[in-house]
């Protein structure tokens, strides 16, 4: 089955183009609490989205899910989550949680009004994952590499693929029967670890979702005027064709890819 692909934007034009090209989820990102402190000095995406963006995009999203990442749990989480759901979110993502109690509180705050996704991106959440997956009401779990590699004081986010952290987490979530994914992908042939290697790891680990990263399409540099629709349609087609190719490969191909990922990641780390 093809990966569910997610793209962050609060621009109606970009959202419509992304949906038309086959992107499964349009993502509004409200998270700001603690993000600058955690990722200070890094070339990471820090959105400036607002609840009004959910209201703006909702009429344009016909076939994709409208997904919203809220802030980590805080004193006003109930008000924020209520506003997000009332604005039209189909799926709500919780970042930077740590324990099963955090997950349980979030599920209770959603109250069955939208789907629940946990963004597992703290070392504590990874360590508590066997308990977390037993919380009733979790629809999906995504393993977030951007903050997780920082938590483990690594140099490169895809070290988490090489050292087994992602694989162990995937195994725990899969055994609990919860759909899961991890990290992001660029266009085929792009990225420090090219997207085709990452996508093959998704298939080896039986992941069902991935984020389309800024390296897939940065609207400020890559997607200008009429080029945006051509870029999305062309590059999404390439990804789907590569997925169809992977579906016909055996375990030996996927294991060879795993070894190649290890070699590339080790070269990146040594050259850092």
Image (tube, helix red, strand yellow):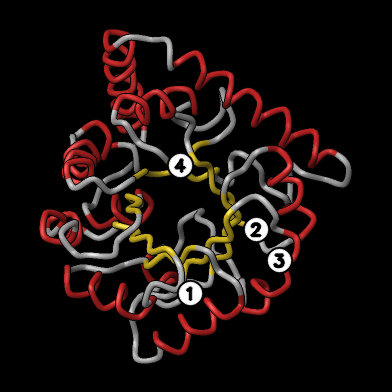
- The extreme right residue here reads 226
Which residue is denoted by mark 1 in the rendering? 32
SS at mark 3?
A: helix
Locate the N terminus by quadrant. Answer: top left
Which residue is denoted by mark 4 in the rendering? 210
Q: Indicate the quadrant where residue 224 lies.
A: top right
| Image location of residue 7, percent across then percent down | 59, 50
Specify whether 59 is left or right of 208: right
Which residue is denoted by mark 3 in the rendering? 57
Disc number lying in front (1 or 4) = 4
**Camera-nearest residue between 47 and 155:** 47
Specify whether 231 is left or right of 88: right
Disc number lying in front (3 or 2) = 3
Vertical relation: 38 (above or below) 55: above
**Camera-nearest residue between 221 and 74:** 74
Q: Earlier in the sequence, mark 4 or mark 3?
A: 3
| Image location of residue 83, percent across then percent down | 54, 84
Specify whether 122 is left or right of 92: left
**Camera-nearest residue between 31 and 105:** 105
| Residue at mark 4 to residue at mark 3: CA–CA distance | 21 Å
Residue at x 58%, y 40% (from the top left corner): 215
| Residue at mark 3 to residue at mark 2: CA–CA distance | 9 Å
Which residue is denoted by mark 2 in the rendering? 9
| Residue at mark 1 to residue at mark 2: CA–CA distance | 15 Å
Q: Earlier in the sequence, mark 3 or mark 2?
A: 2
């Amino acid at each position: 089955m093809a990966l569910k692909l997610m793209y962050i934007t609060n621009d109606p034009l970009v959202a419509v183009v992304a949906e038309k090209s086959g992107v499964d989820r349009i993502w509004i990102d409200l998270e700001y609490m603690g993000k600058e402190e955690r990722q200070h000095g890094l070339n990471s995406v820090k959105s400036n989205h607002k609840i009004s963006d959910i209201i703006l995009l909702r009429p344009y999203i016909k076939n994709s899910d409208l997904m919203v990442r809220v802030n980590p749990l805080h004193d006003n989480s109930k008000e924020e989550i209520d506003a997000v759901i009332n604005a039209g979110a189909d799926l709500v993502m919780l970042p930077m949680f740590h324990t099963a109690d955090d997950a349980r509180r979030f599920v209770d705050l959603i109250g069955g009004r939208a789907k629940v996704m946990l963004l597992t991106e703290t070392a504590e959440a990874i360590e508590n994952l066997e308990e977390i997956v037993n919380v009733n009401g979790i629809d999906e779990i995504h393993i977030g590499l951007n903050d997780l590699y920082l938590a483990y004081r690594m140099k490169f986010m895809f070290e988490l693929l090489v050292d087994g952290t992602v694989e162990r987490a995937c195994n725990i979530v899969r055994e609990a029967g919860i759909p899961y994914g991890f990290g992001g992908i660029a266009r085929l042939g792009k990225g420090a670890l090219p997207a085709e290697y990452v996508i093959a790891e998704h298939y080896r680990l039986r992941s069902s979702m991935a984020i389309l990263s800024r390296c897939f399409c940065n609207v400020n540099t890559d997607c200008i005027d009429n080029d945006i629709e051509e870029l999305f349609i062309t590059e999404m087609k390439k990804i789907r064709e590569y997925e169809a190719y992977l579906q016909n490969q055996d375990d030996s191909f996927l294991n060879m890819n795993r070894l190649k990922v290890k070699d590339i990641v080790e070269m990146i780390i040594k050259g850092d």
